[in-house]
Image (cartoon, rainbow, N blue to C red):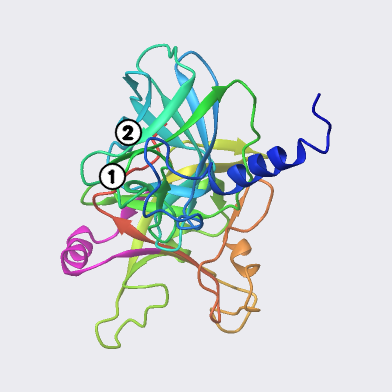
Amino acid sequence: MKTKWMMIPALIALLLAALFGCGAPSGSDGEGWQPGDYANNPTLIAAQKCSDTVIRLSFSAPVRPAVKEAWKRVSIGDLSAASMRLLDLRKDATFHLCATVIEFTFPSPVEGTEVRISAGEGENTGRALTGVFCGGHGEGLYAPLGEEDAPYAAVSVTEEERILPDVPAAMVAATRESEDTVLAFFSKPVRMIKAWEACGFFADGPDPAPGEGNSWQEYIKSASAVDPQETDGQVFSEVWRITVKSPSALGARFAAGTVFLRISENDERAGEEYVSDWNNEDIGRVVSAQDGTPVEADYTAGWDVAYVPVQTDPVWLPPLP
């Protein structure tokens, strides 16, 4: 009979295998791969079955789709997803929409117990799915399974409910809808306390200096809520449709380079138009969420500005209501 002391070497061997062996790619001998090579890459950590056709995937860090129709790379058995929605919406350092939880809808009821994310041809760099989903600095989703030339990430599907992370109220994206309209997307429903016409602008950057060099700024004409939600008599919305004041002038700006949408603090209490304590509070007098918190400022150098580049061909945007 084995004693507990005789079992210690076996337990140590199992521990070493867990520490250094389980991370090696399945389906290969791991040659050329070292533990820690992908330590900074986001990973797939959980899959929740929400209904017969809806699966929510959770990631270790915010990820963004790197290719249009990235949902087609997500499958259960032979069934690929038909659409996706980023849930805890935010923007990364390069102003791309990202999330730690993404909901995938399948065209018919799913029957398998494992969900996979795979790369198409040329969509991986080693075991990083750089051409499918990637982190804020372009680091691809870690795919530890499969062959080196066809890696994939996988996780078992459960019905265990996972709480969505909270995100700050922020302007996360904007896209040119037509010649004279632009859609602005927020992570939460927000309202403009001051008039859009007074605080919303198109410009060449977050801090334009119109009349100096090639710097410019264009005013907007109006804005309307796309998905209006009324709270205490005030209208909030996650998406606002902005009407351009001078479509031809702005069209020329798009042709010449990047156009930014900016919402700027406008402090009527001060003698000067812009005053700031170098924090995020002042913009709360311009735009806020339903709980009264200010929209997150992206620029606070003397005054508060929320801004995003206006995309003309986005990889993914939230579906309109």
For label 1, the SS is loop
Q: Residues within 10 Å of mark 1 (few under 14, many from 20)?
A: some
Q: Position of residue 241 (x, y in %)?
A: 38, 46
Q: Residue at x 49, y 43 (%)?
A: 238
Quarter holding the C terminus?
A: top left
For label 2, the SS is helix
Q: 151 or 79: which is nearer to us?
A: 151
Q: 310 or 77: which is nearer to us?
A: 77
Name the residue beneath numbered marker 1. 67
Magenta stretch?
Answer: 241-261
Foreground mark, 1 or 2, reads 2
Q: Residue at x 57, y 61 (%)?
A: 296
68 relative to 96, above or below:
above
Q: Mark 1 vs mark 2: which is more N-terminal?
A: 1
267 relative to 118, above or below:
below
Q: 153 or 242: which is nearer to us?
A: 153
Q: Residue furthest front?
A: 1
Q: Is residue 251 magenta?
A: yes
Name the residue beneath numbered marker 2. 73
Q: Position of residue 126 (x, y in %)?
A: 32, 51
Report how far apart the C-alphas of labels 1 and 2 lie in the structure.
Answer: 10 Å
Mark 1 is on which residue type? Val
Looking at the image, residue 225 sits to the left or right of residue 169; the answer is: left
Q: Position of residue 169 (x, y in %)?
A: 58, 52
Q: State yes or no: discs 1 and 2 in contact (Cβ < 8 Å).
A: yes
Q: Residues within 10 Å of mark 2 (few under 14, many from 20)?
A: some
Q: Position of residue 14 (x, y in %)?
A: 64, 39
Quarter holding the N terminus?
A: top right
Mark 2 is on which residue type? Arg
Q: Residue furthest bottom?
A: 212
Q: Residue at x 43, y 14 (%)?
A: 110
